[in-house]
Amino acid sequence: MTTIDWLTKQPISHRGLHDLNNKRWENTLPAFQAAIDAGFAIECDVHLTKDKQVIIFHDNDLKRLANRDGSISDLTLEEARQLKIGNTNDCAPSLQDMLELVRGRVPIVIELKGIEGSDDGLVEAVAQQLTAYQGPVAIMSFCHHLIRQFSQYAPNIPCGLTAEGSNTKALEAHFSMLAHDLDFVSFHVTELPCPFITFVRNKLNLPVITWTVKDMDTKRHSDQYADQITFEGFDPRAMIA
């Protein structure tokens, strides 16, 4: 198990410090730069491209973010890096683009987005790029089949489970993933408190971050049950008079 005290020291900007996709869109270099300038950690999402490279992009489908048909996994890295995001001239960055921008100045939490049949090699590719990176960084995923590969391809990188759901089936699935040497959990804030998260924090002493916190009231709720927030749309450092 890896020590990751840095994970909970500062709020984590969800897909960078974007402005709810008005002028500064999610998962773009300007959003990451804004997070660096503000001193927030960064959460971002990655997919595997057609040529087995790593692109920062949230959706599989291109429509919402790039206003065109198709899937991100059907593009090469260079094709994906040409995608104009939203109504801006900012393009989808590669993982390497982002790492070169951040340079260890703030922590990074990378969520690996799996697409069955199109993600073979994603964990390995991300781990290879992080090998030489100097700075606090962790990986996480919703996808259990990817998490099962973390210990093989990324044994020295802090790893986490991204999760939601508190019914019996979901809880059983969450608990089953504890067999894979997790270092932290990222959980849906509106589903707290949760027996799984109570066990993870109180029995295993693992840090828990939440997603996605969008206002101060939700932050206060998260603070009761978790160690740090992943946020968007407000400044979590704002003082309430």
Image (tube, grey):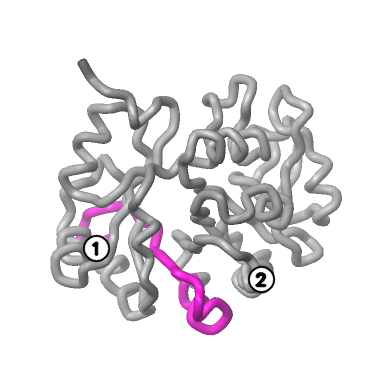
- Give percent across and percent down for residue 185: 34, 60
* Element under disc 1: helix
* Element under disc 2: loop
- Give percent across and percent down for residue 139: 50, 63
- Does residue 2 sit above or below 97 in this rendering? below
Query: Residue at position x 55%, y 59% from top?
Result: 112
- Does residue 227 sit above or below 92 in this rendering? below
Q: Which residues are magenta?
A: 147-170
Residue nearest the viewer, comparing 106 with 178: 106
The numbered mark, 2 or 1, whose residue comes first in the sequence reads 2
Q: Which mark is residue 194?
A: none
Q: Nearer the viewer, mark 2 or mark 1?
A: 2
Q: Which mark is residue 171?
A: 1
Residue type at mark 1? Answer: Leu
Residue nearest the viewer, comparing 61 with 209: 209
Taking 167 as reference, is 25 left or right? right
- Give percent across and percent down for residue 63: 68, 35
Query: Residue at position x 34%, y 73% from top?
Result: 177
Question: Is residue 140 visible in the rendered structure shown here?
Answer: yes
Taking 153 as reference, is 87 left or right? right
**Quadrant in the rendering for residue 2:** bottom left
Taking 66 as reference, is 23 left or right? left
Rounded to the nearest angstrom, the CA distance separating label 2 from label 1 is 36 Å
Residue type at mark 2? Answer: Ala
- Give percent across and percent down for residue 164: 33, 52
Query: Residue at position x 80%, y 53% from top?
Result: 75
Q: Which mark is residue 132?
A: 2
Image quarter in which the C terminus is found: top left
